[in-house]
Amino acid sequence: MSDGATSDGGMGDAPSGGFAGRRRRCRGPRQETLLRMLENTLVHAERPGELIVYAGLAKAARDRTALKRIIEALTELEEDETLVVQSGKPIGVFPTGTRAPLVVMANSNLVGRWATSEHFYELERRGLIAWGGYTAGDWQYIGSQGIVQGTYQTLAAVADEHFGGSLAGRLVVTAGLGGMGGAQPLATVMAGGVALCAEVDPDRIRRRVDAGYLDRGTESIDEAVEWADAAIEAGEPASIGLLGNAAQVLPELRARGVVPDVVTDQTPAHDLLYGYVPAGMSTADAAALRESDPGELGRRARVSIAAHVECMLAWQDAGSVVFEYGNNLRAQAAEEGVDAFRIPIFIERYIRPLFCRGLGPFRWAAASGDPADIDAIDALVVREFPDNPLVGRWIPKARRYVRQEGLPARISWLAHGERARLALLVNEAVGSGALRGPVAFTRDHLDAGGVAQPLRETENMPDGSDAVSDWPLLNALLTAGSGADLVAIHAGGGGYAGYMQSAGVTLVADGTAAAGERITTALTADTGIGIMRYADAGYPAAADAVRASGLRWFG
Ligand code: NAD
């Protein structure tokens, strides 16, 4: 076993501030980097006291005791050992070898017949399970930049398809300014448009204004419409928070004759108890009813969602571009008899063509805490991938608009092959001392190889394989077998049960030759199985990508 006395990968003498002032606490730079990713995930928590990072209940660890033990375990972990984490609780450490993951985890998985909200909540209450979201439970969250980029990417694709490549002079109406939804106003502004965002909680509006993600807020519908009209007339990008319940203020906007160009939503409609606030209630009212009569709260939330979706459908019929942004809004409204699935999901329409080429939300974080490391990698990405238009369009905008929070980090959509190439170049730069410390590479689970979610990422697959969750499980097995540093299998979503199966992966570039080998095999495997999944489903573009990859395929 390693004695832990190896180079600290530059982390120990990084500049002060943030994470950077601290010396390495773990026995190797890979373990330290994973620990910093865990801490960084918690830096971004919407409710840090409860370890809840976003989406109502997505946790980075089961509870405070589990968190303390995970930190201790990572601190003592050797290079050839694997820490096993079950739904945010550390279980044990195994001797596995230096090519094995340092951490494996399974978060919120339930046997099919028992994968219901009732079972989930009961097990959660008894402290036996925790929901990890996509990137909270596996310590891959880099703050709202990830979702800003994803939302920008979606809006840019909408602009390309419907509005000649720009949202300038276009009105985007949406709701929810939470951990994920808070990115919507900034992403709209980056795409040139005017965002009008309904939000029921005044604190959330304030937080997004303070963070520079939202220009200003009002509780007056008239004032919001006035501001939006003025920005549209001037052709200036702008973002406006409107205090109110989406189920009430959207129909009121419609009654005033507003027909937005684009309509979507990021209220937490996947969760009727801890998420969507019913019409006529404050967040405090909803919390009180949750205690006294949770069934009634759920019923009221669903009725409100139905009204909300009816309004979106009316706008769709009037010519607005309307799509669901993956919050299970349509399924909840459909339970109330609304013909909600007339609204398309954003993935099938705008994102899946990218997944067919393995193009997806790749991201990296500088464990040194030094923003100069991210500046250097920005320059490298732009130089290395001049033909990837997503990079050319995004990186300059990200540098201008995205404030670094927590560990300096960047997300950029890169394709199969591009990801391994970039990570290898970065690994060399870490090794040569051009970067100040190790770099963690990871991705959203919302990616080619990462997820089965029949109401979102895998809705309407051409071969009908929407609900086959073998694919993310194969992804996890393959990335674990090919040298990834952390591999996670997640389930839950949509009321936290039964809606999705996904896999997450993290690689650490610590500048060593061994890291170079792990990066090459694991990142090739990660997107490789992704493009094969879409090729297998019948997408010709994915089959072309697989053929071009040189991987052996039996299609
Ligand atoms: P969150 O719980 O952090 O925030 C939700 C916000 O919505 C809160 O600010 C809340 O006050 C507000 N809200 C609740 N009910 C409302 C109502 N009726 N009207 C107006 N505002 C209301 O949740 P989040 O992390 O921002 O995620 C939001 C939803 O978007 C989730 O369902 C999440 O799963 C989904 N999402 C999906 C994707 C994806 O598909 N890739 C990406 C991001 C988010």
Image: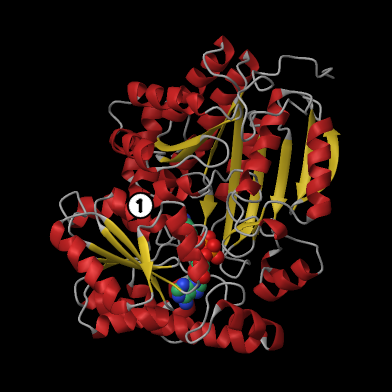
The residue at 20%/50% (across/down) is 166
Q: Position of residue 153 (x, y in %)?
A: 34, 48
Question: Quarter-wise, where is residue 522 in the image?
Answer: top right
Amino acid residing under circle 1: Ala
Quadrant of residue 407 in the image? top right
Can residue 454 be seen from the camera position used here? no
Q: Is residue 201 visible?
A: yes
Q: Which colour scheme is used?
A: secondary structure
Does label 1 point to a residue whose CB lies under 8 Å from ligand 1?
no
In-image side of 363 versus 540 (left or right): right
487 relative to 157, above or below: above
Left or right of residue 392, residue 449 in this image: right
Query: Which residue matches tag 1?
Result: 187
Mark 1 surroundings within 10 Å by alpha-carbon count, few (fewer than 14), some (14 through 19), many (20 or more): many
Of all residues shown, which one is farthest toward the top? 432
Residue 299 appears left or right of 543: right
- Give above or below for 478 relative to 185: above
> In front: 149, or 207?
207
Could you tell me which residue is drawn at 19 percent across and 54 percent down?
Answer: 168
Q: Which residue shows up at 29% across the image and 72% down it?
A: 224
Could you tell me which residue is drawn at 75 percent across and 14 percent down? 6
Q: Is mark 1 on a helix, strand or loop?
A: helix
